[in-house]
Amino acid sequence: MYTIPFLDIPPLQGAHGVVRLPGSKSISNRVLLLAALCQGATTEVCDVLASDDTDAMLGALQMLGCRIEREGSVLRITGLQPDAMPAQASLHLGNAGTAMRPLTAALALLLGDGQVYELTGVARMQERPIGDLVEALRQLGCEIEYLRNEGFPPLRLRAADPARRAGHTRLAIRGDVSSQFLTAMLMALPLLAAERAYTIEVEGELISKPYIAITLELLARFGVQVDNEQWQRFTIPAGSAYRSPGQIHVEADASSASYFLALGGIASDAGQGHSITIEGVGADSIQGDIRFAQAAAQMGVQIESGPNWLRVQRGRWPLQAIELDCNHIPDAAMTLAVMALYAEGTTRLTNIGSWRVKETDRIDAMAAECAKLGARVESGPDWIAITPPAAGVNAGEGAGRGGWRAASIATYDDHRMAMCFSLAAFNPAGLPVRIEDPRCVGKTFPDYFETLFGVVQALPGQVPVICIDGPSASGKGSLAAAVAAQLGYAVLDSGALYRIAGYAACARGIPLHADHAPELAQVVQEMDVAFVGETILLGGEDISLKIRSDTGSRNASLISAIPAVRDALLQFQRDRARLPGLVADGRDMGTVVFPQAPLKVFLTASAEKRAERRYKQLISQGLSANMTTLREELHARDLRDSTRAVAPLQPAVDALSLDNSDIGIEAAARQVLSWWEERRPFSESSRP
Ligand SMILES: Nc1ncnc2c1ncn2[C@@H]1O[C@H](COP(=O)(O)OP(=O)(O)O)[C@@H](O)[C@H]1O
Ligand SMILES: Nc1ccn([C@@H]2O[C@H](COP(=O)(O)OP(=O)(O)O)[C@@H](O)[C@H]2O)c(=O)n1
């Protein structure tokens, strides 16, 4: 997961490969609660989603006394025993609607005398309505107080008054704000239905029926058969009780699949034999969002499917604009809005009023961010219409007047905003896209960007590379790591490669001399190197520290002067340029390996400072060091590195110099990041 302030996605071109998606959030949180409501029984839940929202549910269940054991991808959950639940509890449910609503209902019915529970969440959760659910529960005699604003969490629950509850077996609930209210009641009422039936009347048109279908399907798997009369009246028969299915499998998230269905339709060129295969969810899914596939197909995407897989390719191109009532796919419909950026004509999505009460007001958010990209957007209380930017780059100010603009996309703490807008990186203008606060995908798909980068290709030469070259111990490695951490980029420590090469050659007894160039190049080609975090393995042997010794440094400097060795390492280094970007440090990153890099830094520090730093570094690593020999060695190495015939240490003509003798690593990183920012197109162009 990228836990950085923003993630820049370079312009992308193609997509091909296989993705396995994480478990469905809707199924995971329902199953976790249902398993917890099977008193005393143990349920094995396989492939449950690991995310912020499921963590919120699991944390709450654990606090209530539920036993939860994890073994690989299986969670073993032993149901709550009401008499063993704590007298008081305060549950923080983040921004997880799928935890807040059903837990409110189930706990309101479960609480016994003297028990008092408080349920709260993040600020946005405190703006998400829950009044209709509370009203429904109050019809059953439940005691629920609003602790801040009427109609919104946080809530305080106390035991229901049995006298007031008696005789109430019918209740009404609104169905037109959030289907989660009905889901919550459907999951809670079986706790009361041992002796009498309960009936729920839905007031108003029921939105998001597919989510209710998931609820009913899962209730059936846990032994409760609900009678569904036309989606308007639901009866939980007398004698209902939860029974653990023993084991249950969570299918992959169909809403998450929408991004990859769109991706294939936008970027997997069938002519080149490219496709995106999605594993873990398929045609027989119980999730309503699987019907996103039909909407995508309507826009021209080619989709094949089987029981547990989907395969997708680009069909019609550009995509076809559509007009669609999206009530059946409220979450996945956001992906259609971004696909609309690649369609011919205006796409109009209607009946999406529920977008306004989700993680953010998604209609406003979607409108604002599509406009930043240059699209023309209109919207109303429950609809949005998007006309894509013209194909070129927008030179002027203002949205909707011309071509594409490089935008910094605000994500409003909404995972779906972040995932949707990653697809804007395929814009025909070849502009990068900045996704602010990419960590928000943790709500349902923590590794979304990693999964995306695993199957997409950047435009040739468009993976950003920042080069940091300079003399020994000037701080290149530290600076590269600090800059890369801020941007979510990988690091190439090219010096380590020469150190490893020197070590490998010595281990084979080959003199580090130009006379042995062919054998040395051969050794380099055969090196079996693995980088595991900070650890470097050569043929399985941990050589991380050994190559940092004085001898390791000298050997690296000697072998690196041999052209055949440098040639042998060239492609390997270039191949490290991977999405979303790379920071490369060494001697010739800017001059030889990545001559086209958009930012090259030549890092220096005084000889005295460098010797001191290296001395301290070696001592702290437990290696021996002597200041006098270190100074001499550094001097000799600088001389050798900068006077050798091939790829000598020297600044690239377009490199920026940074002397960090008197500034720390953080200040140096700030300087490099500010140079980098100057080279990014977002600051001028993303003003709406
Ligand atoms: N700006 C700085 N100020 C103080 N110490 C630094 C600075 N930059 C790096 N160092 C320290 O100097 C040592 C050498 O830095 P390193 O990044 O390994 O240099 P290089 O990769 O250029 O050989 C490390 O112990 C590091 O913590
Ligand atoms: N791109 C590079 C990186 C390192 N090298 C060589 O490899 C040696 C060790 O590199 P390093 O970056 O680990 O050295 P330090 O700066 O850490 O002392 C250098 O002295 C160079 O001779 C190179 O020739 N080209």
Image: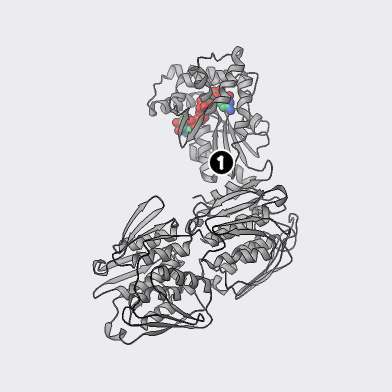
Count residues near mark 1 (Cα–Cα under 10 Å), then give few for <14, some for 14-19, many for 20+.
some
Residue labelled with disc 1: 671
Q: Is residue 539 left or right of residue 594?
A: left
**Looking at the image, is 47 positioned above or below residue 523?**
below
Residue closest to the far top: 515
Residue 530 at x, y = what percent?
50, 32
**Looking at the image, is 130 positioned above or below residue 492?**
below
Residue 169 at x, y = what percent?
36, 85
Instruction: Tell me the quarter of the picture where residue 344 sits.
Output: bottom right
Q: Is residue 448 left or right of residue 11?
A: left
Residue 482 at x, y = what percent?
50, 40
* Of 408 and 497, the residue lying toward us: 497
Residue 492 in sight from this viewpoint: yes
Residue 494 at x, y = what percent?
56, 30
* Of 303 and 551, the residue lying toward us: 303
Q: Secondary structure at mark 1?
A: helix
**Looking at the image, is 681 positioned above or below residue 83?**
above
**Looking at the image, is 130 positioned above or below residue 575?**
below
Instruction: Tell me the quarter of the picture where residue 363 sits.
Output: bottom right
How are the residues colored? one colour
Residue closest to the far bottom: 167
Residue 411 in sight from this viewpoint: no
Residue depicted at 44% across the width and 55% down the height: 47
Q: At label 1, which amino acid type do we have?
A: Gln
Q: Is residue 57 left or right of residue 608?
A: left
Residue closest to the far front: 307
